[in-house]
């Protein structure tokens, strides 16, 4: 590991972030065309990828997927990354460090795999050897050269459990985002009878974790220590607290209407 990488790793470690990987920002990187491109630093040279484990011990009555249980990662992850960026700017004056998560110009799963942070699962998710796939991915894209060529992508072992268990079959059929139950739970407006049935059978008012729950790598994975990513969890959402929760949780961006509709589908007698 280069001394630049060692310095960066120790800054992240001092802030409680231990799962850190490095990747050169090269011309052949598959950059996604979205509005986050505007925030890229001039002449990006490297990507510091960080994993944020969020899985909590199971809680009876949970009615949302695991990533929605914790506070909105679109807020908590950049808050931690920006603290690291402030420190790094002191160590490397004149260099820029810009934080991204989810709404990012890079395909975070394949970049994290190429930075050596884990395997690429057949469920299309990054699987950390320590924490499994219940990890958010965030990154600092920087002007600082990191000397980190891409590592070969490691497969997950292809046991096929996620494909078999996928409730919509999309993992068996060449994956189409529109057919993923996670996407269906986020859809606004009217749902088809088939989509309604899928939500009712799945039992989750937001998101889908089926292809992760069955994965052997997750069954053996460690739970993270308590940290800002997992504090103040809400396992079960109900009508009463919906407006307030929508202000601070990952499901809020669609507005309370989508959640309200899904909750009504899960408890038709309470409509
Ligand atoms: C759009 C999106 C969605 C869409 C579409 C998902 C998809 N897989 O395309 C929907 C709404 C369905 C979705 C759902 C979920 N998402 Co999402 N999503 C994204 C987002 C914003 C972009 C994904 C994308 O379009 N990539 C670019 C295209 C080009 O990639 P692609 O063609 O699909 O795949 C490429 C590579 O991944 C690779 N590849 C794909 N599969 C495989 C498998 C193998 C074996 C190999 C070798 C290669 C390979 O080949 C492709 C060409 O490069 C990312 C954040 C980001 N910026 O990357 C989060 C992200 C992938 N989502 C995330 C999460 C948590 C989820 C859910 C688990 C949420 C939930 N519980 O409901 C589900 C999981 C669904 C699933 N099984 O994929 C996390 C995943 C973390 C992790 N551990 O990997 C991300 C990284 C957000 C984050 N910052 O943490 N998501
Ligand atoms: S999130 Fe659910 S619907 Fe989507 S691929 Fe995984 S198991 Fe299938
Ligand atoms: S369930 Fe099996 S095939 Fe699917 S991601 Fe996990 S190890 Fe890979």
Image: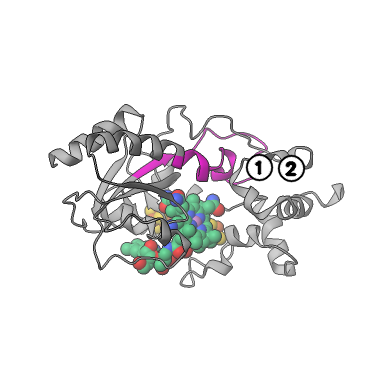
Position of residue 36 measured from the top left corner of the image (x, y, whole percent)? 44, 59
Residue sitting farthest toward the front:
94
> In the image, is 47 to the left or to the right of 187?
left
> In the image, is 253 to the left or to the right of 130?
right
Quarter holding ligand 1 = bottom left
- Ligand 1 closer than 8 Å to the CB at disc 2? no
Q: Which residue is mark 1?
A: 247
Position of residue 205 measured from the top left corner of the image (x, y, whole percent)? 68, 50
Above-or-below relation of 174 to 142 = below
Which of the 4 quarters of the picture holds residue 249? top right
Q: Is residue 164 visible?
A: no
Residue at 58% across, 47% down: 250
What range is drawn magenta here? Answer: 50-78
10 Å crowding of disc 2: few (<14), some (14-19), many (20+):
some
Above-or-below relation of 59 to 103 = above
Quarter that holds the N terminus: top left
Marks 1,2: beta carbons within 8 A: yes
> In the image, is 113 to the left or to the right of 34?
left
Front-lying residue, 36 or 252:
36
Residue sitting farthest toward the bottom:
173
Give the Cα distance between marks 1 and 2.
7 Å
What label does residue 243 carry, if any?
2
Residue at 43% across, 68% down: 33
Q: Secondary structure at mark 2?
A: helix
């Amino acid at each position: 590991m280069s001394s630049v990488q060692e310095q960066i790793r120790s800054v992240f470690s001092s802030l409680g972030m231990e799962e850190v990987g490095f990747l050169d920002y090269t011309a052949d990187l598959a950059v996604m065309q979205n509005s986050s491109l505007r925030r890229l630093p001039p002449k990006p040279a490297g990507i510091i990828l960080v994993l944020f484990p969020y899985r909590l011990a199971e809680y009876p009555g949970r009615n949302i997927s695991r990533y929605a249980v914790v506070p909105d990662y679109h807020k908590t992850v950049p808050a931690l990354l920006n603290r690291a960026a402030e420190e790094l700017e002191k160590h490397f004056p004149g260099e820029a460090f810009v934080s991204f998560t989810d709404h990012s110009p890079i395909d975070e799963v394949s970049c994290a795999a190429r930075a050596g942070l884990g395997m690429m699962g057949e469920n299309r998710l990054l699987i950390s050897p320590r924490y499994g796939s219940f990890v958010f991915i965030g990154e600092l894209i920087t002007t600082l050269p990191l000397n980190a060529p891409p590592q070969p992508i490691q497969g997950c072992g292809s046991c096929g459990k996620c494909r078999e268990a996928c409730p919509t079959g999309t993992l068996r059929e060449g994956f189409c985002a529109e057919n993923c139950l996670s996407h269906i739970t986020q859809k606004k407006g009217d749902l088809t009878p088939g989509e309604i049935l899928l939500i009712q059978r799945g039992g989750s008012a937001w998101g889908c974790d089926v292809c992760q729950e069955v994965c052997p790598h997750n069954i053996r994975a460690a739970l993270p220590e308590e940290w800002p990513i997992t504090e103040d969890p809400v396992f079960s959402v109900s009508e009463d607290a919906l407006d307030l929760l929508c202000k601070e949780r990952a499901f809020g961006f669609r507005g309370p209407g989508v959640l309200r509709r899904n909750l009504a589908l899960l408890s038709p007698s309470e409509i």
